[in-house]
Amino acid sequence: MEKEHSTSIAVLYKFPHRGYSPIAFTCLLLTMHIYMELRVPKYYYEMENKVSPDTLKEILSHNNFGRILGMAIFYSELVHGVLPIFEHYVVNVPALQLVVVFASVKALPVSTVPSKECFVFHRVHPRKLYLFRCVVR
């Protein structure tokens, strides 16, 4: 136990003399750990609470919102379904952009992807609202 204490003091003693690499490396690992601990529950929450196409039609039919020029991009890990935050967005924002894209990035277990398959676009129902799903491979 005493060796661990003396090692940490040795690192602090060297800090003013450019001995900050162990602390910087520790901060990097801590940041990566926190990111992964927050990302996984977020993904499961989105999977369990994604908005179905029927619910989406109901939400959009009950709200009177204006359409404005522009494009809105909602990023998520989901490849299918609509984000639960989109329902909150439609209810609380009085305007919706003309084109809405739900984007996600998925890694494939191959070294290269043909250029025609890098971006996969699908139209999300209802078609008249210009909602799209884009999967970037």
Image (spheres, rainbow, N blue to C red):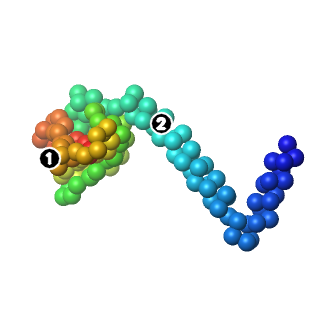
Q: Is residue 125 visible?
A: yes
For label 1, the residue is: 116
SS class, disc 2? helix
In this view, which residue lies farthest toward the left?
A: 128
Q: Residue at x 21, y 33 (%)?
A: 57
Question: Relative to 71, is 15 above or below?
Answer: below
Q: Name which residue lies at 18% across and 58% down.
A: 69
Query: x and y percent of residue 35 in the render?
Result: 52, 46
Q: Which image quarter: residue 86?
A: top left
Residue 14 vs residue 62, the one in the foreground: 14
Q: Amino acid at mark 1?
A: Lys
Indicate the secondary structure of the residue bearing disc 1.
Answer: helix
Q: Marks 1/2: CA distance?
A: 30 Å
Q: At x 22% / y 55%, what residue is drawn?
A: 71
Name the kind of residue labelled 2 in the image: Val
Q: Among all residues in the image, which is located at the extreme right?
A: 2
